[in-house]
Image (cartoon, grey):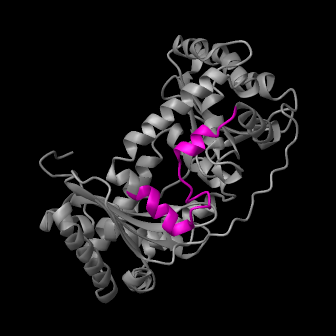
Amino acid sequence: MNRQNAPAIKDAVEFDILLKPYEKFTLDNGIPVYVVNAAEQDTLQLEMVFPAGSFYENETLVAAATNFLMKNGTAQHSALEISEAIDYYGAYLNRTSAHENATYTLHCLSKHLPALMPTLQEVILEPSFPEEELAIYKQNMKQRLVVNLQKSDFVANRHIDRYLFGEFHPYGRVSSMEGYDALQAETLRAFYQRHYTYNNCRIFMAGNVPGNAIALLNEAFGKTQWNGTSQLIKPELPILPATEKKYRIFNDENGVQGAIRIARPFPNRYHPDFPKMLVLNTVFGGYFGSRLMSNIREDKGYTYGIHSQVYNFRQAGAINITTEAGRDVCEAAIVEVYKEMERMQQELIDEEEILLVRNYMIGSILGDLDGAFHIIQRWKNLILNDLDENYFYNNIRTIKNISVEELQQLARQYYNPADFYELVVI
């Protein structure tokens, strides 16, 4: 080896990316368990997923409150005792509630899984929703809402979702003081009993998985039909976007920045244009070297950062351009966003730029596949959306092979300023 000569540079697009397969197990009562085993570190991630998001609630905020308070007390232990039992082993039990699904995720050292399993079982199977914990939750969330409503970016996010999807749709509904006041323990218990059932549960596990892990899961969650069988039918709710397209909201008279949102509806991941749009969006505003960043941040100096995202929900999607800029330059920043849209429609992307974007996107995917925790998240997203590895590999092929002519045609179809909702909150 001649160390005076630099090694050859290999573009990321030249790599063959393989998605490591999972192993599937089934507990005695039918709960599926998906496992990606890797022994690099003695850590474990165990995630239990339920169709218990806001899409299924009949009353606002019930899904999130139920998910949060399951950990805050059982018939046997208080919230403090549960937290101490988890902290003792240096573990972390996280809970999240989104539009479609709600999750409980345990992170721990692999050797401590047997000791932590009884606590996890108790949280999932025996939450009691104590009145005092609900009162604390309502008080904390209301205080947080008061603080957040003073922030222009928070207000902008609430309003743009309402414009895109309608204020009564789960994707457009927002929290309120009245919603928190209306929460009742009995309502949360009823939501829990209907959605956190054995036949609605799916388990994803990754890391250094102990040999007895499936047996432990089966003993804790696979022996009974806990909470009974619940057949959920996801409601088909109409999306009723706002009729007006341009909004200006005055939120903080002393603020020095305005929050800008420019967004439009867009098909979700099941549409053939979705993977193509991910490439176009990256060129436009999806990474630090994007056109929006180069123009509005680097050249004009209107903002510290501007980003464009393709939102993907189960029923619908959206394109959303977000930034915060000085109050005196918000309108000028919007003009530049539209200029970049028109430029995408009129000019072909040059080969150097598209190669850079291809390498960036493939490199990001390679990073997202670094380790079992990342790999199981890829599989979870596919499985929960009724997709398989062919969808993953099709996206890779699109990134590598989509032509600049196809991207220009996409820009002409989806980057028309008249189709976008425009919001400034100052």
Question: Percent x, y for residue 161?
Answer: 49, 62
> Which of the 4 quarters of the picture holds residue 334?
bottom left
Is 224 displayed left or right of 7 in the figure? right
Is 425 displayed left or right of 185 in the figure? left
Q: Residue furthest bottom?
A: 346
With respect to residue 398, does 107 lie above or below?
Answer: above
Along the line of sight, the residue nearer the viewer: 172 or 27? 172
Residue drawn at the location 72% of the way across and 25% of the way down? 127
First to last magenta residue range:
156-184
**Image quadrant in which the C terminus is located:** bottom left
Q: Does the magenta stretch include residue 157?
A: yes
Question: Percent x, y for residue 42?
Answer: 52, 22
Q: Is residue 106 magenta?
A: no
Is 319 displayed left or right of 64 in the figure? left
Along the line of sight, the residue nearer the viewer: 235 or 316? 235
Say whether residue 212 is visible.
no
- The number of numbered discs placed on residues in the rendered structure image is 0
Question: Percent x, y for residue 45?
Answer: 57, 31
> Which of the 4 quarters of the picture holds residue 419?
bottom left
**Image quadrant in which the N terminus is located:** top left
Residue drawn at the location 57% of the way across and 59% of the way down? 171
Say whether residue 252 is visible.
yes
Residue drawn at the location 69% of the way across and 58% of the way down? 386
Question: Percent x, y for residue 299?
Answer: 13, 67
Residue drawn at the location 33% of the way across and 70% of the way down? 283
Along the line of sight, the residue nearer the viewer: 122 or 163? 163
